[in-house]
Image (tube, rainbow, N blue to C red):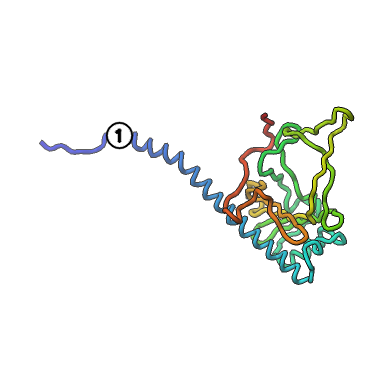
């Protein structure tokens, strides 16, 4: 008597179910890793392009350092115009215009204002431009004192984003924030594509008198990794 070996319908369905579960668990991880890799590559490329443009601008104009490029006798628009001589821009917007970069930008990790997470719109702080590859940049020359001393007093906030009130005076407490930047260059590596978040596709390049610097948390140029937290604006504070 001949017997034919094979799988029963139940066995096939169980196997397909297992495959489906494994796929559901692994595919999102693979997609996320791929997207992260794209963001890292864009971040490295954009930072290198902007850094090169800054160095060329310094050399072409005979400046001794970045403080001369970000001089107090220039507006942010004038500084943008100089830098764009070494970058290919398809659109330039003045300070306060949101046509180039109007989206709300999330912080790299949750920050709270009055108990809820919030973001920031940067177009009010300086002129913006869109480059040919879709990259967006913003230039902000700070109103510093001598040697780019931008230190200032500011309101102290608690972890939930509420002002800390002095019990004796009833007024918000003030703290000194030491800062020696001449200005900043914000870059968005992929335009409107998102996630429009610091540490992911958006980065703050600090302009010091003699060098440029990323945030200490942004180490993608060294280790190829991004540093940001996945969250939504409007989430309530959790102690």
Q: Position of residue 40 (x, y in %)?
A: 58, 53
Q: Position of residue 213 (x, y in %)?
A: 70, 56
* Residue in the image at 72% along x and 68% along y: 56
* Residue in the image at 81% along x and 59% along y: 77
Q: Position of residue 112 (x, y in %)?
A: 72, 36
Q: Position of residue 33 (x, y in %)?
A: 52, 48
For numbered disc 1, what is the local secondary structure?
helix
Count residues near mark 1 (Cα–Cα under 10 Å), then give few for <14, some for 14-19, many for 20+: few
Split into 4 quadrants, where in the image is the C terminus? top right
Question: Residue reaching furthest right?
Answer: 169
Tag count: 1
| 51 up-or-down from 39: above or below | below
Q: Quadrant of residue 110?
A: top right
Mark 1 lies on residue: 11
Foreground residue among 159 and 194:
159
Q: Quadrant of residue 132?
A: bottom right
Tell whether 177 sits left or right of 43: right
Question: Residue reaching furthest top?
Answer: 167
Foreground residue among 91 and 74:
74
| 69 up-or-down from 111: above or below | below
| 169 up-or-down from 55: above or below | above
Split into 4 quadrants, where in the image is the N terminus? top left
Q: Quadrant of residue 82?
A: bottom right
Foreground residue among 182 and 80:
182
* Residue in the image at 62% along x and 60% along y: 45
């Amino acid at each position: 008597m001949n017997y034919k070996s094979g799988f029963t319908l139940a066995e096939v369905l169980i196997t397909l179910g297992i495959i489906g579960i494994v796929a559901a668990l692994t595919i999102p991880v693979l997609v996320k890793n791929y997207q992260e890799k794209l963001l890292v590559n864009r971040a490295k490329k954009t930072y290198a392009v902007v850094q090169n443009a800054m160095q060329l601008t310094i050399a072409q104009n005979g400046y001794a350092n970045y403080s001369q490029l970000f001089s107090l006798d220039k507006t942010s628009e004038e500084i943008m115009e100089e830098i764009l001589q070494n970058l290919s821009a398809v659109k330039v917007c003045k300070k306060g215009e949101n046509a180039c970069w109007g989206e709300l930008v999330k912080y790299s990790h949750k920050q709270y204002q009055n108990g809820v997470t919030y973001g920031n719109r940067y177009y009010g702080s300086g002129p913006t431009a869109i480059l040919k590859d879709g990259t967006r940049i913003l230039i902000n020359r700070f109103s510093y004192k001598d040697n780019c001393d931008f230190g200032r007093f500011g309101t102290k906030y608690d972890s939930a984003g509420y002002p800390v009130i002095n019990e004796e005076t009833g007024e918000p407490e003030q703290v000194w924030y030491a800062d020696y930047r001449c200005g900043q260059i914000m870059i968005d590596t992929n335009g409107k594509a998102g996630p429009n978040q610091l540490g992911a596709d958006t980065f703050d390049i600090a302009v010091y008198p003699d060098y440029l610097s990323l945030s200490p948390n942004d180490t993608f140029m060294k280790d190829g990794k991004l540093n940001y937290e996945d969250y939504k604006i409007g989430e309530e504070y959790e102690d």
